[in-house]
Image: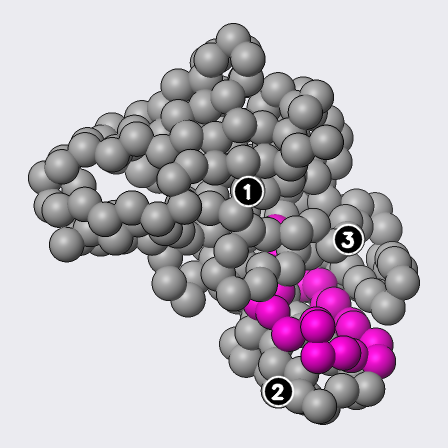
Amino acid sequence: SQQGEEDPQALSIQEGENATMNCSYKTSINNLQWYRQNSGRGLVHLILIRSNEREKHSGRLRVTLDTSKKSSSLLITASRAADTASYFCATLNTGTASKLTFGTGTRLQVTL
Amino acid sequence: DAGVTQSPTHLIKTRGQQVTLRCSPKSGHDTVSWYQQALGQGPQFIFQYYEEEERQRGNFPDRFSGHQFPNYSSELNVNALLLGDSALYLCASSPTFTAKNIQYFGAGTRLSVL
């Protein structure tokens, strides 16, 4: 079963705008990761945030984590057409060793 | 340095048949996980192999089985195919149980069951 929900399910913005996607999960986690998937192919790891961290940056990506609300957000700043993809959060849950549990994903469309 | 490779890329089968999917992990990785991704959904964990043994399993029936070879490559077998098995099957590799567990994914095998 999926870990939780991501919203919005779909997001359409213009190039240069910021994109924010949210992820909710259900159980205690060791870390939360964000992955990108282009056109239904393989997933690419973007960024990881540990359960004891609140914010992480990597280039144009900013991730926040609120463990009290069991939620995370991914912000992509100054979006580009090449950012068009589906974005998934995935949690490494406490006590499940190295099994990742994915959310339902957000489809991002960046137009020129 | 080759990443995770999967074969075949596409496969068409009929109900009741059996299928084998293959995966070669990224160099230096010894843990292989398999995921099933239905259209419009996130990947769902099938099972994970390490040291040629199944270490964790998701909520999938026994029709789904796997194997890991001494060179760390892996196979996913699905017996008695159902229409609902149509999906993208993703293989991911990672180094031995790390605290981070960042997984590296292959491009997937798209299975269509008719």
Dot 1 alpha-carbon crowd within 10 angstroms: few under 14, some 14 to 19, many 20 or more: many
Q: Is residue B46 visible?
A: no
Which mark is on residue A47? 3
Q: Quadrant of the C terminus of chain B?
A: bottom left
User: Looking at the image, is mark 3 or mark 2 earlier in the sequence?
Assistant: 2
Q: Which residues are magenta?
A: A70-90
**Mark 3 and mark 2 on one chain:** yes
B113 or A57, which is in the foreground? B113
Say whether residue A32 is left or right of residue B6: right
- In the image, residue B15 sits, relative to residue B1, either above or below, namely below
Q: Nearer the viewer, residue A21 or B36?
A: B36
Q: Of circles 3 and 1, which is in front?
A: 1
Toward the viewer: B67 or B42?
B67
Foreground pick, B24 / A46: B24
Residue at 79% across / 46% down in the picture?
Answer: A50
Residue A79 lies within the magenta run: yes
Instruction: Give the label, 2 or 1, closer to the camera.
Output: 1
Q: Which residue is mark 1?
A: B106
How many residues crowd mark 3 within 10 Å: few (<14), some (14–19), many (20+)?
A: some
| Circles 2, 1 touching at the beta carbon (< 8 Å) | no
In the displayed structure, would residue B16 be above or below residue B96? below
State the mark number for residue A83: none
In x, y percent, where is residue B113?
20, 51
Q: Amino acid at mark 3?
A: Ile
In the picture of the structure, the residue carrying the numbered disc 2 is A12
